[in-house]
Image (cartoon, rainbow, N blue to C red):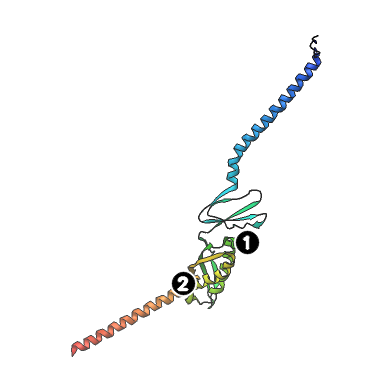
Amino acid sequence: MMSSPTLQPEESPSEQIRSGSTDINKYSKESRKEIFFRILAILIIILFPITLLICFRVVKQYKRAVIMRFGRIRKDSPAGPGIIWMIPCTDDIQMMDLRTQSFNLPPQEILTKDSVTVTVDAVVYFHIQKPLHCLLNIQNNQYATELITVATLRNILGQHSLYNLLTRRESISFKCRTDIDKTTSRWGVVIERVEIKDVFLPFELQKAMAAEAEGTRVAKAKIIESEGEIKAAENLKEASK
C-alpha cells in the first residue's frame, strides 16, 4: 500500500507575521552594514589625500627641519631639503632658515678712551650654520645675537680713542666680529660681518673740530702764500743779476 503524503500544518496568521518581521530585521541589519562600509570607504577615499598632505612636508633648499618625536630629537634631524615624513600626533617640526640675516643695532652712546661720548650705528650680518645646536642651545638666536653684539661693541669701542674710532673703523669692525663669533658659534650661529655705519659726534665737538679744521686750512694757506712770496723774491733776485 502506498503511504499518503504527510500534510504540513498551515501557519497561523500570527506566525506568518513573526517570520516576515524576522526577514525584515535580517534585511535591515544587512543593509545597515552595507551603508556603514560604504560610508567608511568614502571617508577613507576623501581623507587619504589629506592624510598624505599632513604626513609629508616639503623642505626648501635654504631651510632645514628639526623634528622632535615625543620630545626627543629624531635621528634624521636636521632633515631636508626635499620631502620629509612625519607623524602629526607624535612629531613636532621646527623649520630653520639657513640664509644670511641682518639687523640694525639701535644707536649706542659710547664713551671712548679719551672720554668723548659718541653715538654709533652698526649693522650685523649672520646665518645659522648648525640648526640642531641653534634650536637646543638658544631660545631666540637673533635677539641673543643682538644683545651680545651691543655688549661687545661697547667694550671694544671703549678701548679706543676717538681718532682711532674714526680712522681705524674696518679693523675695529673685524675685531668686533671675531669676538662676537666666539660666543655665537656655541649656538650654531656664524657672524659674517659687523659694519660700523656712522659715528655721530656731540654738537660742541663738531664745532670745535670744524674750527680746528678751518684754522688748519688758514695756516696752510698762509704757508703756501709765504712760500710763493719767497720764491717770487728769489726769482726777482736772480733776474736782477
Q: Residues within 10 Å of mark 1 (few under 14, many from 20)?
A: few
Q: Is residue 54 visible?
A: yes
In the rendered image, which residue does mark 2 sit on?
170
Q: Residue at x 53, y 65 (%)?
A: 190
> Of all residues shown, which one is farthest toward the bottom?
241
Image side of residue 235 versus residue 170, left or right: left
Q: What residue do we see at 66% from left, 57% from top?
A: 72
Closest to the observer, 241 or 133: 133
Q: CA distance from mark 2 to mark 1?
A: 34 Å
Residue 164, above or below 46? below
Location of the N terminus by quadrant is top right
Please provide percent x and percent y for residue 165: 49, 74
Q: Secondary structure at mark 1?
A: helix
Q: Nearer the viewer, residue 9 or 142?
A: 9
Residue 131 placement, left or right of 207 = right
* Residue that appears at 77% across and 19% down: 19
Q: Is residue 187 left or right of residue 172?
A: right
Name the residue located 25 percent from the left edge and 86 percent from the top edge: 233
Q: Residues within 10 Å of mark 2 (few under 14, many from 20)?
A: some
The answer to whether residue 178 is above or below residue 98 is: below
Q: Nearer the viewer, mark 2 or mark 1?
A: 1
Point out the image quarter for the C terminus: bottom left
Type of amino acid under label 2: Glu
Q: Amino acid at mark 1?
A: Leu
Q: Of residues 156 and 37, which is closer to you in this image?
A: 37
Q: Residue furthest top?
A: 1
User: Which mark is on residue 136?
Assistant: 1
